[in-house]
Image (cartoon, coloured by chain):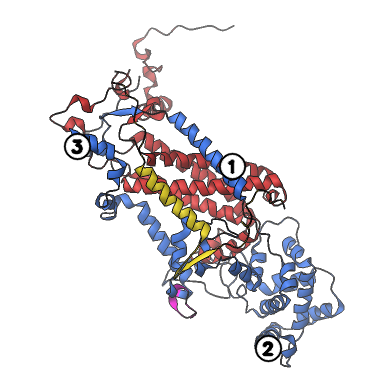
Amino acid sequence: MTTTHPAPDVADSSDTPDGGTIADSTMWTSRLRRAWMSKLPPEKLLPDRQPAYVASWIYVFGVLTLAAFLVVIVTGLVLAFAGPAWYHTSWLGHFTNSLHFWSVQLFFVFMVIHLWGKFWMAAWRGRRAMTWITGVVAFLASIGTAFTGYLVQTNFDSQWISFEAKDGLNAVGIGAFFNVTDLGQMLLLHACLLPLVVGVIAVWHVLLVRLRGVVPPIDAVDPADRADVRTDLLAARPDDTPVPEARP
Amino acid sequence: MDHTYQLAGMNDPATYLDLGWLSISVANLVVILVMIVIFLLAILLPFPKDRDHS
Amino acid sequence: MTTVTDKPRSTDIAARDWKGPWRRYDIVKEGVIAVVVVSILTVLLAGLFSSPDEPQLTFQGWATSAPDNFYATAVQELAGTSESAGYGPPYNTAADGVSIGPIAPQQWFGVTHPVDAANDFVLTPLRSQQQSADVTDALATWDGAAADQQTSWATDYDTALTDAGGDLKQIAPGDYGPVPVLAQGLTDMAAAGALDGILISQGGFYQTDFTKQILFLGDGSYLDDAATAAHLQGNTWGMMNETGSYPGQAWLWLYSFWYQIPTFNSDNPDDYLTSHADAVIFYIMALLSLILLLLPFIPGLRSIPRWIPIHRLIWRDYYRSQHRT
């Protein structure tokens, strides 16, 4: 039998609007939740609008990169499930390998075009340096991940690439603990560790974009700064409520 | 090994364009040129206007 | 209720919340469309072009298609004159490794993947299976000799073989001990396919580290010639290339670029930049990557988008709407 207890009738434990109690303000959980909700409320995480200047096809290359990453992961999971030698002898394996190969090519094509766009937009402006930095780290980590992928093909290409790459890495000491001729090490890095690293950095990067918003145009003017603000500059929003941050 | 799905010749040695110090495979050159074209199209092609809500 | 952290009103408009006009944006729909488009593109490309899979090289292939080169390489492994035998860290202490001034990480980290070319590539494989009488006798002769004697037999034979241009009939008479028989024994083992299996197992059962195989394979010309034929050599932009007619790694163009510069791949092994190319180029690329990473903080570089105003094309609708007011 369950008993229900009515909320105690004391001032210091009355409910707050977000479902917590005043006594919760010292709790790590509620403090984390409040910090998250103030910085990244659902309207910012899953927006249904964006600034009117986000109106160019160059803006689709970030999401195309993410989509390609998803296809790379899914095809990679299939290859991982069947083991590294499967695709040499199976028709389906070879097709899966082809999907993985071309999705990686698309991944880099879209990522580099995205990088070009963000450079020419100087997208690091307005406290967005970390967005740029996480993007570059994701790029470099992706190159490293792809490199380990080439090493675990278990064919002639892997033999040559490992033979050549060892010299560059040995010359700077990295070869002492990152052994490109060790298939076991390279396979586990490629299939486990590095995709996780790229994924975590990509998530961080996307959250930063959601947090800061899409960078305004170079030399953009804040309507509030203009003495002669004209109402036709401010197009009507889908609904008349104020900006999300102040919405109850 | 079943190669039904490849265009004839994908496993043949590539054609390389040797222009002095630069030597590039046709495949890589195509990829790079396509990227440049896509970038130019992306910044030049008009983007659909927002639906009017006034 | 969500609470607002009011940002101080900064002079940098890019840092403020956008107070200007908005447009509709369906982020979920955009993501789904992107996944569908990329999936279709991937299936099309995979269906039309397939993917490269050049068969792996084997020691059997080497010993049957280029037996003279295999034989000569086996001699070099015994003599300690092969690239692997004289590599240095992380494989052995035969050389110091590459250093740029006091920066010598190759030495600092030492030998972490020990490779003893003569034993790992030649003698242990020979000992691991039943051999003909002459090879068995040759092994016994080798094992019974002092290290100095072993070295002089092998280096003398290596020199004689090189002088004879690899032609066994032209070798000058000399005291080469059991070396010719050992080298021939290994060549026969490799041609029969036994060497591939023995190098994989290396006296054990499970094995996932192919360091010894790759080093041995690369000591001869078999792997190198195959790479040259596939346009994969470093000084022909090989780092960017793929086997067959497939696109390679175009994103490695800048790393590959430095190896094309004659100062980094001259024929003179005493040239500093040539002999230290791998380290120097790695450090150059690390520096350039750091510059790309820290671009927002680098004056001049971060202003390039302002000086070359491609952004005026990207945001032309916005600038037009500004101009109208």
Question: Which residue has dot 2 on it?
Answer: C164
Chain C color in figure: blue
Q: Quadrant of residue C61?
A: bottom right
Q: Amino acid at mark 2?
A: Ala
In this rendering, the answer to whether A73 lies above or below C24 is below
Question: Which residue has dot 3 on it?
Answer: C323
Marks 1 and 3, the one that precedes in the sequence: 1
Marks 1 and 2, the one that precedes in the sequence: 1
Which residues fall within the magenta stretch?
Answer: C264-273
Q: Is residue A119 left or right of residue C142?
A: left
Q: Amino acid at mark 1?
A: Val
Residue at mark 1 to residue at mark 2: CA–CA distance: 56 Å
Q: Is residue A248 left or right of residue C175?
A: left
Per the image, label 3 sits on a secondary structure element best described as helix
Marks 3 and 2, the one that precedes in the sequence: 2
Q: Badges 3 and 2: C-beta atoms under 8 Å apart?
A: no
Q: Which mark is residue C69?
A: none
Q: Residue at x 55, y 63 (%)?
A: B15
Q: Residue furthest left?
A: A227
Q: Quadrant of residue B21?
A: bottom left
Q: Chain of mark 2?
A: C
Question: Which residue has dot 1 on it?
Answer: C43
Pinpoint residue A8: horizontal percent, then vertical percent.
Answer: 41, 8
Pinpoint residue B53: horizontal percent, then vertical percent.
Answer: 31, 21
Residues packed near mark 3 inside 10 Å, few (<14), some (14 to 19) or many (20 plus) = few
Residue at mark 3 to residue at mark 2: CA–CA distance: 83 Å
Question: Which is nearer the eye, A120 or A168?
Answer: A120
Q: Chain of mark 3?
A: C
Chain B color in figure: yellow
Q: Residue furthest right?
A: C133
